[in-house]
């Protein structure tokens, strides 16, 4: 039985063999499955035996042999598939006609950069399924219009009718990465809400776009000075709206990627030593009743490297990290450097911690490592301490002494004193 998620499809309706080849290549590169049709009639036959939820989107040529004036676009939209229009026409009439429909976007066949944009758009449509956007406006009609636009791009949408409700919704849903707020609302204005939410959420955690149809340049400055990332005036072009939304979402993602790179050990994907202490110190401020630090070291790691090669040693570190992550998923585990790891446990007792640490040690010892056609086993030694008087470094020193005792006593054991 295969439990892996089904690869999503992209319906590509294009009559030019050259363009079809390029589009299918881009779809495949994005990790999606292209389903090709050269006419509207053929697309209907293909889709008749499918389900809409199988498709991430459709790439539809504006002009086809049996649909010369955009009829294939209407078909894809009516079939409830997010639709991206591909067109060789660059005139204003065609652009206006395309944008008057409920399309995700349109791509003019101008140059290679346009296809690069399409590649990023395909990836964006998949990512957006996990991203929440909050729309704050006292007009129900406006909220509905904006959320309808956002859903074309697969965003998860939330609504609030004023700033107070907006703050409540934001605190209830951790997946919200963007807030789009009007200024003129009862109870709490957009600017007031932005200033308040910045007490909790930084610009790098939640982006804010201020919106108003009655403001001036001074209002945009007030929004930005109060903590907004961006501002847009009504009425706005859908293209500009989506460009600004995407730009702000990608800013949040880029910052998150930089943070992860700075806080994560590149080999094991565990938190690094610096980030480990940041998280632990934050937890210690909540004054837990019981804490324990454990230092874990791979036994005879130099022998593994010398016998099987450094790449096998790296593989051993990765496997050990996965085992530790699984056993301590409700606690903090980090790679301290070299072959050494550290675990921080809280809200337990000595017996429970001993059992948890022993199970991790036993699994490592019983796991047969396989790399480059070679099989080998190794063990870990653990030193732990729950003697905590408010000084984490002092507790770690005791744990380190206990690790030394475990090594001196024959390795592959836990010393918890």
Image: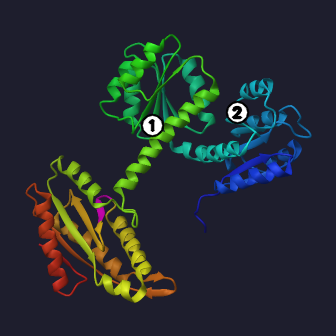
Query: Where in the figure is residue 127, as x and y percent of width and height?
Result: 55, 46
Left or right: residue 147 compared with residue 229: right
Instruction: Examine the image and state in which quarter residue 318 appears.
Output: bottom left
Q: Quadrant of the N terminus?
A: bottom right
Which residue bears the numbered disc 1?
176
Q: Which residue is mark 2?
A: 103
Is 34 on the left or on the right of 340, as rendered? right
Q: Residue 326 at x, y = what percent?
A: 37, 66
Q: Give the class, few, some or many, for how many residues have Cα within 10 Å of label 2's Cα (few <14, many ≥20).
A: many
Q: Residue at x 34, y 84 (%)?
A: 378
Q: Is residue 136 left or right of residue 343?
A: right
Is residue 183 shown to the viewer in this render?
no
User: Looking at the picture, does residue 9 appear above or below residue 321?
Assistant: above
How packed mark 1 is, by other alpha carbons closer than 10 Å (few <14, some 14-19, many 20 or more), is: many
**Mark earlier in primary sequence (2, 1):** 2
Task: Tell me which segment is drawn in magenta.
Answer: 330-335
Vertical arrangement, residue 269 with respect to residue 301, above or below: above
């Amino acid at each position: 039985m295969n439990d892996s998620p089904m690869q999503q499809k992209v319906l590509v309706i294009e009559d030019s063999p050259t363009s079809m080849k390029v589009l299918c290549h881009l779809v495949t590169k994005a990790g999606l499955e292209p389903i090709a049709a050269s006419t509207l009639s053929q697309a209907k036959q293909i889709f008749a035996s499918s389900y809409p939820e199988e498709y991430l989107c459709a790439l539809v040529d504006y002009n086809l042999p049996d649909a010369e004036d955009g009829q294939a676009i209407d078909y894809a939209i009516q079939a409830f598939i997010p639709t991206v229009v591909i067109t060789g026409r660059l005139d204003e009439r065609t652009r206006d006609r395309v944008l008057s429909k409920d399309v995700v976007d349109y791509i003019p066949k101008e140059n290679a950069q346009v296809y690069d944009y399409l590649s990023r758009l395909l990836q964006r449509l998949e990512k957006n399924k996990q991203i929440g956007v909050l729309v704050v406006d006292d007009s129900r009609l406006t909220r509905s219009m904006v959320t309808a636009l956002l859903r074309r791009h697969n965003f998860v949408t939330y609504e609030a009718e004023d700033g107070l409700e907006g703050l409540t919704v934001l605190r209830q849903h951790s997946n919200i990465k963007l807030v789009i707020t009007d200024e003129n609302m009862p109870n709490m204005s957009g600017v007031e809400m932005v200033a308040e939410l910045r007490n909790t959420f930084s610009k790098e955690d939640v982006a804010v776009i201020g919106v108003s149809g009655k403001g001036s340049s001074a209002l945009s400055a007030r929004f930005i000075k109060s903590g907004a990332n961006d501002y847009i005036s009504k009425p706005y072009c859908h293209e500009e709206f989506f460009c600004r939304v995407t730009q702000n979402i990608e800013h949040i993602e880029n910052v998150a990627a930089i943070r992860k790179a700075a806080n994560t050990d590149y080999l094991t994907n565990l938190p690094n030593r610096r980030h480990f202490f940041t998280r632990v110190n934050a937890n210690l401020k909540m004054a837990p009743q019981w804490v324990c630090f454990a230092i874990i070291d791979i036994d005879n790691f130099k022998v593994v490297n010398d016998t099987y090669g450094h790449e096998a040693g790296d593989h051993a570190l990765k496997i050990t990290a996965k085992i530790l992550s699984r056993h301590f998923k409700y606690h903090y585990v980090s790679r301290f450097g070299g072959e050494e790891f550290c675990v921080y446990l809280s809200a337990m007792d000595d017996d429970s911690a001993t059992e948890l640490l022993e199970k991790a040690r036993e699994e490592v010892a019983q796991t047969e490592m396989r790399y480059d056609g070679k099989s080998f086993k190794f063990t870990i030694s653990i030193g732990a301490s729950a003697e905590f008087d408010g000084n984490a470094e002092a507790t770690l020193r005791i744990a380190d002494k206990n690790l030394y005792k475990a090594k001196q006593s024959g390795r592959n054991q836990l010393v918890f004193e």
